[in-house]
Image (cartoon, rainbow, N blue to C red):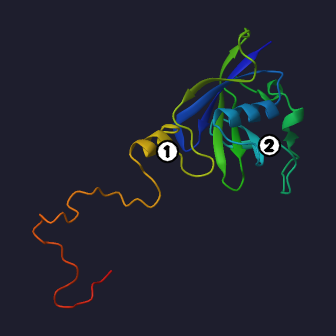
């Protein structure tokens, strides 16, 4: 049975990608699910694949479901379409769009075909991750789980103004703290 390895690039930054492996008999629904898992996205939104050429032009649509929009040709459905049936050349490309409101786009490129299955893998599987994935719902700290540790270490709590207690009027300062403008002028803010 053929094992297909796809490189799934985040469209906005090609240094961020995930390599996923699937069996050629598996469906686009399974490819959709492994891409979401690889990028740590949930599965709450609409999604579709487009068969593509070398110039990343959108071709035949392979959709999660038939959506309420105009189609040039009726879409294939992910759950009914095997991946192997849509491979037209050795470097086959697909465009994957997830969450039509946010418009997450990924470029999916076939990079390897193998006849040998890895007995240790449960297909589909993520074979390689490169780069920090974008956060689906806003910002994600580069530190990830370390952010909580950093907040605790530096006592970064809500409402803290970020200043230490050095020079807080211990009586030895030279009274250089000016409270207002001596001439009574209003300050512009």
161 relative to 39 in the view: left or right? left
Residue drawn where x is 81% and y is 34% of the image: 29
Q: Quadrant of residue 161?
A: bottom left
Mark with earlier residue (2, 1) = 2
Depth check: give the residue in front, 52 or 186: 186
In this rendering, does residue 142 appear at all? no
Q: Which mark is residue 166?
A: none
Q: Which mark is residue 141?
A: 1
Residue farthest toward the bottom in the current orientation of the protein: 184
Q: Quadrant of residue 153?
A: top left
Residue farthest toward the front in the current orientation of the protein: 171
Q: Secondary structure at mark 2?
A: strand
Residue farthest toward the left in the current orientation of the protein: 174
Residue drawn where x is 13% and y is 72% of the image: 176
Coordinates of residue 83 in the picture (x, y in percent):
80, 27
Depth check: give the residue in front, 77 or 182: 182
Coordinates of residue 76 in the picture (x, y in percent):
87, 40
154 relative to 172 in the view: left or right? right
76 relative to 49 in the view: left or right? right
Coordinates of residue 55 in the picture (x, y in percent):
62, 39
In this rendering, does residue 14 appear at all? yes
Q: Quadrant of residue 65?
A: top right
Which image quarter holds the N terminus?
top right
Residue 116, compared with residue 125, is above or below; it is above
How many residues crowd mark 1 within 10 Å: few (<14), some (14–19), many (20+)?
few
In this figure, which residue is indicated by the disc labeled 2?
A: 61
């Amino acid at each position: 049975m053929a094992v297909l390895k796809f490189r799934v690039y985040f469209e906005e930054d090609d240094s961020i990608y995930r390599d996923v492996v699937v069996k050629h008999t598996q469906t686009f629904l399974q490819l959709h699910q492994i891409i979401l898992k690889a990028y740590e996205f949930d599965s709450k939104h609409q999604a579709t694949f487009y068969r593509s050429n070398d110039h990343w032009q959108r071709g035949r649509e392979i959709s999660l479901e038939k959506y309420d929009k105009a189609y040039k040709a009726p879409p294939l459905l992910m759950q009914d379409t095997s991946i192997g049936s849509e491979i037209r050349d050795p470097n086959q490309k697909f465009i994957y769009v997830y969450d039509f409101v946010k418009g997450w786009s990924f470029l999916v490129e076939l990079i390897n075909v193998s006849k040998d299955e890895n007995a240790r893998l449960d297909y589909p599987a993520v074979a390689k991750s490169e780069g920090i994935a974008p956060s689906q719902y806003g910002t994600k700290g580069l530190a990830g789980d370390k952010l909580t540790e950093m907040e605790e270490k530096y006592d970064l709590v809500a409402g803290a103004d970020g200043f230490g207690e050095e020079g807080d009027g211990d009586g030895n300062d030279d009274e250089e703290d000016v409270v207002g403008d001596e001439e009574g002028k209003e300050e512009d803010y």
